[in-house]
Amino acid sequence: MRVEVVSPCCLHLGFVRGPEGSACELVIALQHPPIQLTVQPAQQLLVSGARADVAYHAAEAYYARIGQAPHSWIEVELAIPAFMGLGADEMLHASVAHALGCVLRLSDPPIAYSAFRLAFRHGGLLLVGERGELLRRATIAHADEADDWVFVLALPQAPDDVPHDFELQRRAVLHRASRRLDASCVADALFDAVEWDDFDAFANALAALHAANRAALFADGHPAELNDQERDVIARMLDGGAKFAGRALVGLGLVGLIEGGPASRALRQALVRHLGYFGPRVMATICSNHGARVMTDDFYI
């Protein structure tokens, strides 16, 4: 049996205060850039395509958990760019494990759930507790392109010397800094804005949470300084109509939030003209409300 998995990426929106002052994570699953891979039985472990090294280690870890010798062929057609703050490694590990489970007709082996794994399974906007429990979930409607809530991404080329676990390091630093968050830093306003379908309120709440997490990093001795190009791109996003813009809290990607497909296209065109052909990769995406899609040779799972 051949299995295909298409997974969203996962943008980390920061930490907030949860029940009894706990540190909870906010993430949102986004449709692009996605992961697309296929898995089928083989005599040994064969992995090819984008970020094949990470997929290979993910497969080895999966087979070790179930106590079997690796025997699958994995082709990664599309992968999330590394180091951008979009959960590249975590979502690829989840995609490989789930696809292998389907091919081998096994349920996912027991693992500690994380915000990224929950985004893979469920999609949407998620509030996740300290033990990996899903506390709250919302979906962002996409009924009319003119009113879509569009995330515009500018993804730069990562430096050659960036550590392989860069995003995990950034998340760990952000988690430690979350103890500096004020008790008023909660997710209620963000989820209320989704419920009321209020784009401006959502953008304002997102900007406030982003600023609170950056302030916590600064107070904890890890100022999240921006370089000249990052400041320039963020300023152009805001000048181009984005209601929020900033650098991903656990990566190098720059993120803007704008209302409407036409407005997002105009913003992207302006950014591409300014940044040039060899500049950061510019794309637009919306919330992925359903998590990963799994298909076999003849039907969806």
Image: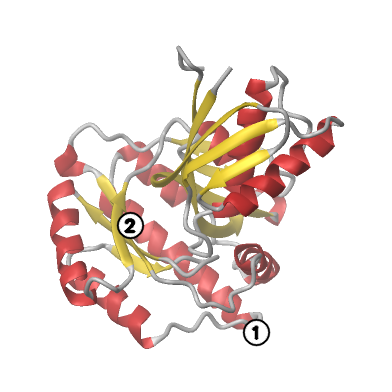
**Residue type highlighted by circle 2:** Ala
- Percent across and percent down for residue 211 are 46, 71
Q: Earlier in the sequence, mark 1 or mark 2?
A: 2
Residue displayed at 54% across by 24% down: 3
Q: The N terminus appears in which quarter of the rendering?
A: top right
Quarter-of-image position of residue 230? bottom left
| Mark 2 surroundings within 10 Å by alpha-carbon count, few (fewer than 14), some (14 through 19), many (20 or more) | many
Residue 158 placement, left or right of 196? right
Residue 190 placement, left or right of 108? left
Residue 96 placement, left or right of 290? right
Kindly identify which residue carries mark 1.
Answer: 221
Which structural element holds mark 1? Answer: loop
Residue 8 sits above or below residue 276 on the image: above
Q: Report, in whole angstroms, how far the alpha carbon at label 1 lies from the one at label 2.
A: 27 Å
* Numbered mark located on residue 203 in the image: 2
Which structural element holds mark 2? Answer: helix
Q: Nearer the viewer, residue 226 or 197?
A: 226
Residue displayed at 51% across by 69% down: 212
Mark in the foreground, 1 or 2: 1
- Percent across and percent down for residue 219 are 61, 82
Q: Nearer the viewer, residue 258 or 104?
A: 104
- Percent across and percent down for residue 96 are 62, 37
- Percent across and percent down for residue 38 are 53, 32
| Mark 1 surroundings within 10 Å by alpha-carbon count, few (fewer than 14), some (14 through 19), many (20 or more) | few
Name the residue furthest bottom. Answer: 228
